[in-house]
């Protein structure tokens, strides 16, 4: 009691100093630290520190002593003092929102530092309830109610569409909010109602709401709107051609879309319920035309498409296997009828031809399999025939030659014919060789060693007829003798020619000499007598002409 009286007298003698008020925000349910003098260091001449509030003192601490709790109310077991003189309040509630004052006695001064305490609590969650079943374009509809609870201060709710905030405009977007306070905890529950007028683009929109940093789960709605336009689609596997199935699909832009339609098939109306499709099976070229679809309850809302069924007809004459004789003609007739431009190509035995084949006069090389391919876009038609040219075998050439070793002879027989002719010889040989049978031609070679002169017969035949040719073949000895005789005869002939040439030259010289002597003599006589000079001259000219003719004749003989 004496200490208290002295303390009171001391306090009366001290000078009071009150500083400005600070504000501290604490979290609901947590331990809150309220700083003294904004956390400034303790003065050196500190005597006492005390915390109090409007309803009384909480605790005091003398220098170098432990703090003593003075409070007897709800703070009795919840307050303590930190080393830096801060007030610690455990398990904060909204009722702790008040002003706490730190009083510091140092020397002759008494200073007070009031601190206003605020308690905040984030909302426990955000959710959307009372969702609309669907949204109708142009009609204001309560989309839903967004709520968040156990918050302080009261949470502010924001609505979002596709993550963009919605701003109330009083027309298409109307937002109304209200706050409810819990009587026990003092915490608030905020609810917000969104009235929204949907647009066509809201079909896949995602709506959310949020408070502070908390967002609700996104929600979407079925947006209904009437059909404004329909479109007809043609569906087919591959090109539209004869024999195919064509599916007509009618699409409407309404939501929900119509489930029943009228299909107009070349003037005939087909009603289809609970489906938006109709299939036309096994179409033909006569199926080409205009097709429509419309809504059953609104025939004016329709769409149409012109459909063209492609077709390609082709016939080829002849066909199958065609038998013809060598030298005959064959008429080729290709007829086409199509809905578009055609491309025609020919092949023979799988080899491409540059142009359409013609058969004015058939040869064996014309035999083969011919195919024509006619295309029009993706449509392809093919036709073919096999041509076989037949004929009686004909031997085109026979020949003989001595073998390279000089010890045998090789006989050759070349023939044409179809079917393939068989070659037969009238003699046997040491070996026989037959060429491949190509384009009706065949060559047969026979190697023999004749010991006597022979007449060899080559015979070719098939089921249509035959042909024969002979070859005269001498022995190898006879050919050697004849070769020598030929060489001797050639030598004698050469000698004879040389002799004839020399004789002609000598005769020419003799005649020339005689002519010279004659002319000399004739001139001497005329000088002496002077008679018949003109006649002698005429005779001389005739003689000269005869000599010249003779010389020319001899010259020709020499050349021969």
Image: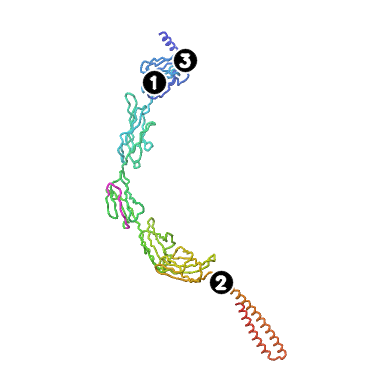
Count of number-bearing discs: 3
Q: Which is more foreground, mark 1 or mark 2? A: 2
- Return the residue at label 3: 46
Region of the chain picked out in magenta, as a range? 272-285
**x then y, percent, for residue 175:** 34, 34
Q: Is residue 275 magenta?
A: yes
Residue, far front: 451
Instruction: Work out whether residue 380 can be spotted.
Output: yes
**x then y, percent, for residue 133:** 30, 38
- Return the residue at label 2: 481
Q: Earlier in the sequence, mark 3 or mark 2?
A: 3
Q: Answer few, some or many: residues within 10 Å of disc 2's Cα (few below 14, many 20 plus, some between 14 and 19).
A: few
**x then y, percent, for residue 446:** 48, 66
Q: In the shown orientation, is residue 550 left or right of residue 367?
A: right
In this rendering, the answer to whether 362 lies above or below 552 is above
Q: Quadrant of the C terminus?
A: bottom right
Q: Quadrant of the N terminus?
A: top left
Give the secondary structure at mark 3: strand
Give the secondary structure at mark 1: loop
Label for residue 482? none
Label for residue 90? 1
Determine the CA span between mark 3 and mark 1: 27 Å
Towards the viewer: 18 or 377: 377
Q: Is residue 553 magenta?
A: no
Determine the CA span between mark 3 and mark 2: 161 Å
In this rendering, the answer to whether 233 lies above or below 438 is above
Towards the viewer: 43 or 387: 387
Q: Which is more foreground, mark 3 or mark 2? A: 2
Determine the CA span between mark 1 and mark 2: 148 Å
Q: Earlier in the sequence, mark 3 or mark 1?
A: 3
Rendered residue at 63%/81% (across/down): 551
Residue, far right: 528
């Amino acid at each position: 009691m004496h200490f208290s009286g002295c303390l009171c007298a001391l306090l009366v003698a001290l000078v009071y100093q009150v500083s400005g008020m600070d504000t501290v925000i604490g979290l609901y349910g947590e331990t809150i630290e309220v700083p003294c003098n904004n956390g400034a260091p303790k003065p050196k001449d500190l005597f006492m520190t005390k915390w109090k509030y409007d309803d009384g003192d909480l605790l005091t601490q003398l220098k170098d002593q432990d703090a003593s709790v003075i409070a007897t109310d709800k703070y009795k077991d919840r307050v303590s003092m930190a080393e830096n003189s801060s007030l610690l309040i455990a398990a904060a509630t909204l009722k702790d929102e008040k002003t706490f004052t730190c009083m510091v006695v140092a020397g002759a001064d008494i200073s007070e530092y009031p601190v206003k305490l605020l308690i905040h609590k984030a909302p426990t969650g955000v959710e959307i309830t009372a969702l609309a079943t669907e949204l109708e374009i142009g009609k204001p509809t309560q989309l839903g109610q967004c709520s968040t609870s156990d918050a302080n201060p009261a949470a502010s709710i924001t609505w979002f569409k596709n993550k963009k905030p919605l701003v109330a405009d009083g027309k298409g977007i109307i937002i109304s909010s209200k706050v409810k306070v819990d009587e026990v905890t003092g915490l608030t529950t905020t609810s917000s109602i969104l009235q929204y007028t949907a647009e066509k683009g809201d079909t896949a929109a995602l709506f959310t709401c949020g408070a502070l940093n908390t967002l609700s789960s996104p929600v979407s709605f079925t947006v209904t709107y009437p059909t404004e336009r329909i479109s007809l689609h043609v569906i087919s596997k591959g090109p539209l051609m004869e024999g195919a199935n064509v599916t007509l699909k009618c699409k409407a832009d309404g939501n929900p879309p119509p489930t029943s339609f009228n299909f107009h098939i070349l003037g005939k109306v087909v009603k289809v319920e609970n489906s938006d499709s109709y299939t036309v099976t096994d179409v033909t070229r006569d199926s080409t035309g205009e097709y429509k679809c419309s809504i059953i309850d609104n025939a004016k809302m329709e769409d149409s498409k012109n459909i063209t069924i492609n077709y390609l007809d082709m016939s080829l004459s002849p066909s199958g296997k065609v038998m013809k004789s060598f030298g005959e003609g064959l008429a080729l007739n290709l007829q086409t009828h199509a809905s578009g431009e055609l491309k025609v190509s020919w092949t023979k035995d799988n080899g491409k031809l540059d142009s359409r084949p013609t058969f004015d006069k058939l040869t064996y090389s014309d035999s083969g399999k011919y195919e024509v391919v006619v295309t029009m876009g993706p449509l392809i038609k093919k036709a073919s025939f096999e041509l076989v040219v037949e004929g009686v075998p004909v031997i085109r050439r026979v020949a003989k030659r001595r073998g390279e070793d000089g010890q045998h002879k090789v006989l050759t027989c070349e023939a044409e014919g179809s079917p393939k002719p068989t070659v037969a010889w009238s003699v046997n040989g040491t070996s026989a060789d037959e060429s491949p049978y190509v384009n009706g031609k065949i060559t047969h070679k026979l190697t023999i060693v004749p010991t006597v002169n022979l007449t060899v017969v080559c015979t070719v035949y098939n089921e249509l007829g035959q042909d024969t040719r002979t070859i005269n073949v001498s022995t190898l000895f006879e050919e050697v003798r004849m070769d020598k005789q030929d060489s001797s005869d050639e030598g004698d002939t050469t000698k004879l020619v040389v002799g004839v040439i020399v004789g002609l030259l000598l005769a020419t010289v003799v005649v020339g000499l005689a002519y010279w002597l004659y002319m000399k003599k004739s001139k001497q006589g005329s000088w002496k007598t002077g008679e018949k000079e003109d006649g002698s001259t005429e005779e001389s000219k005739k003689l000269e002409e005869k000599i010249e003719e003779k010389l020319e004749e001899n010259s020709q003989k020499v050349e021969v």
